Each structure stands twice: as C-alpha cells, then as structure tokens.
Amino acid sequence: MVLIGTLTLMRERAIAVEQFEAAVARLQGEGKTAMVVAVDGTAQAVLAVADTVRPTSAAAIAALRDAGLQTLMLTGDNRRTAEAIAREVGVDRVLAEVLPQDKSAEVERLQGAGLTVAMVGDGINDAPALARADVGIAIGSGTDVAMEAADITLMRGDLRGVAQALKLSRATMNTIRWNLFWAFIYNVLLIPVAAGVLFPFTGWQLSPILAAGAMAFSSVFVVSNSLRLRALKL
C-alpha cells in the first residue's frame, strides 16, 4: 500500500520519518510543500510541490508599500512555506496554517484595532474574509463565490491591479473633491452677482446671456477636470 502525506500524518500512522525530516524542512524553507511517500508502512521518499510565484507579485507588493499600505499574508499553507514566499515577494507579515474562519477573524481583529482592511482573495475559503473586510477584492481568475463576496473584481489575475485600483480610486476621490469645491465657490460668488447684489453700488447687472454662459462654463470645467482621469498612468 502506498501512502502520501505530511510528516504529521506519517507519525500518526506510526511510520518512521526521522531520516526525511531535514529534507522536508529544507524544502519547506524554499517555499515548497513537502510530502512523504510510504510504501507498505516504510517511508521511501519525499515529494515536493510548489505554487509558482508570479513574476509581477514582488512589484505589486512594492507598489502597495510605496502607497503607504501594510501587507499581510493569510494562508492555510505550512508556516515555513508561507514565510519563504513572503520573503520572496516582500510581504510584511505572515499568518499561516489558518482556517477560513480564522481569516475572517483576523480581518475583524485588524478592524477592531482601528485599521481599514482590504482583503484580496480568489478562493472559496477567502469568501468570509472578503465579505468581512472594508474592501473585498477578488481576482477575476478565481472562484465565483469569491467574486460574489467581494466589492471589486479585478479582471486580470495580476496583483498589480490592486495597486492600480487604489491609485485610480484616490485620483477619482481627489477629482470629486476639486469638482465640488469649484462648483461651490463658483455658485457662491456668481449667484449673488446674478441676483443683482452689485447693482446698488455700481449700477451693473449680469446679463442673462452671460449668466447662462457662466453656468455652461462651470459644467464644462467640471467635465473637463473629470476627463483628466483618462490620462492617469496606472
């Protein structure tokens, strides 16, 4: 009988694995998931599998850190494997070997500490944390459940899209503030003039034609200012 499993599983089955412990530790330190192969109750070999880290992941994490965000990896993988991947891409902190409810609990704990939390995930196990976070971001190549639970879905399976979405959101909010400020100041200044507040002092009244043109210019300015977002380099 062939049995493939972790060191813990092998020990539970009373299979001696001492000779493979160093190899398993080394492989886990390289970010790989190591499994022992036992044949007829005797450990024979070690198999290692690893998720391929996308070449753009390190750049994506760096962009998020440059934007002032702290990064945390929540994963059900082995701690050594998770820490090796975190070091490779530059993640600030790792919480490994967690269950789906643990991910949601960690998000809630961070929120309780006064932090605004954005959760990025693509699996069914990520759905509770995506729903609990202030902003849930699903990867478009992930599961339907994750996309349903999230607030935002990135169409590409590229983490750089998170930093791009953040940059676009900040630019959009900044544009909205400027548009509101301009519209408020513009109306505060010109509505009294259109109402004739200057007439008793100067004898001057704003022509209805000029008033209509000024109102149209206000709309043109707001629209033109908003269109600058199209030139935003992401």
Image (cartoon, rainbow, N blue to C red):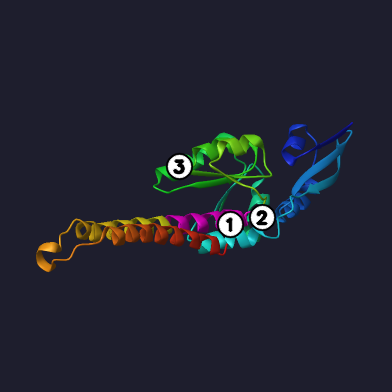
Q: Secondary structure at mark 2?
A: helix
* Amino acid type at image mark 3: Arg
How far apart marks 1 and 3 lie (CA) works out to 19 Å
* Amino acid type at image mark 2: Ile
Horizontal and vertical percent for residue 49? 78, 48
* Amino acid type at image mark 1: Val
How far apart marks 1 and 2 lie (CA) works out to 8 Å
N-term mark: 1 or 2: 2
Foreground of the two, 22 or 151: 151
Horizontal and vertical percent for residue 135? 50, 45
Mark 1, residue position? 91
* Side (left or right) of 138 relative to 216: right
Q: Secondary structure at mark 3?
A: helix
Q: Which residues are magenta?
A: 159-173
Which residue occupies 15% across, 60% down? 197
* Mark 2 surroundings within 10 Å by alpha-carbon count, few (fewer than 14), some (14 through 19), many (20 or more): many
Residue 172 lies in the magenta stretch = yes
C-beta proximity under 8 Å, tags 1 and 2: yes
Q: Which mark is residue 109?
A: 3
Q: Which mark is residue 18?
A: none
Mark 2, residue position? 85
